[in-house]
Image (cartoon, rainbow, N blue to C red):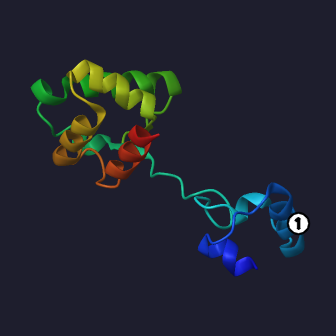
Amino acid sequence: MVGSYERGDRAVTVQRLAELADFYGVPVQELLPGTTPGGAAEPPPKLVLDLERLATVPAEKAGPLQRYAATIQSQRGDYNGKVLSIRQDDLRTLAVIYDQSPSVLTEQLINWGVLDADARRAVASHEDA
């Protein structure tokens, strides 16, 4: 009978779904399509600015980003000087400043060597949400 549910030959009732979940000792969500087995999906990579590379980008291109990063460092009291983690909201704000979409700005920052290429995945997953 379970095979007929899996193939879609029979519709499962909520009651039967609860009974099956109880029988297998799993939450009901594990039996539903579109769920990630074992819990939440892997989080998207963090957005980390390489401040050393940022310092090498000409100011006419990177000036707004340099000022923004300096402001964040000041607010956090983080003067490490090598890398700086930013949030998706920071990237959206920077995109407005640069008059670009977050994905276009991400590509630009990757090309400058300021962001790791994994940042594409972080931005894409956030734009899809």
Position of residue 12 in the picture relative to residue 51 (left or right): right
What's the residue at 18%, 29% (across, down)? Answer: 62
Q: Position of residue 66 (x, y in %)?
A: 27, 27
Amino acid on which disc 1 is placed: Glu
- Residue pointed to by mark 1: 19
* Nearer to the camera, 6 or 91: 6
What's the residue at 53%, 53% (across, down)? Answer: 43
Q: Quadrant of residue 31?
A: bottom right
* Nearer to the camera, 18 or 90: 18
Q: Position of residue 6 (x, y in %)?
A: 64, 74
Question: Is 101 located above or below residue 124 in the figure?
Answer: above
What's the residue at 63%, 72% (across, down)? Answer: 9
What's the residue at 36%, 31% (across, down)? Answer: 91
Give SS at disc 1: helix
Q: Position of residue 47 (x, y in %)?
A: 40, 43
Residue count near mark 1 (Cα–Cα under 10 Å), binned few <14, some 14–19, many ≥20: few
**Where, quadrant-wise, is the N terminus in this rendering?**
bottom right
Position of residue 128 in the picture relative to residue 34 (left or right): left
Q: Quadrant of residue 107?
A: top left
* Nearer to the camera, 121 or 45: 121
How many numbered circles are shown?
1
* Nearer to the camera, 80 or 30: 30
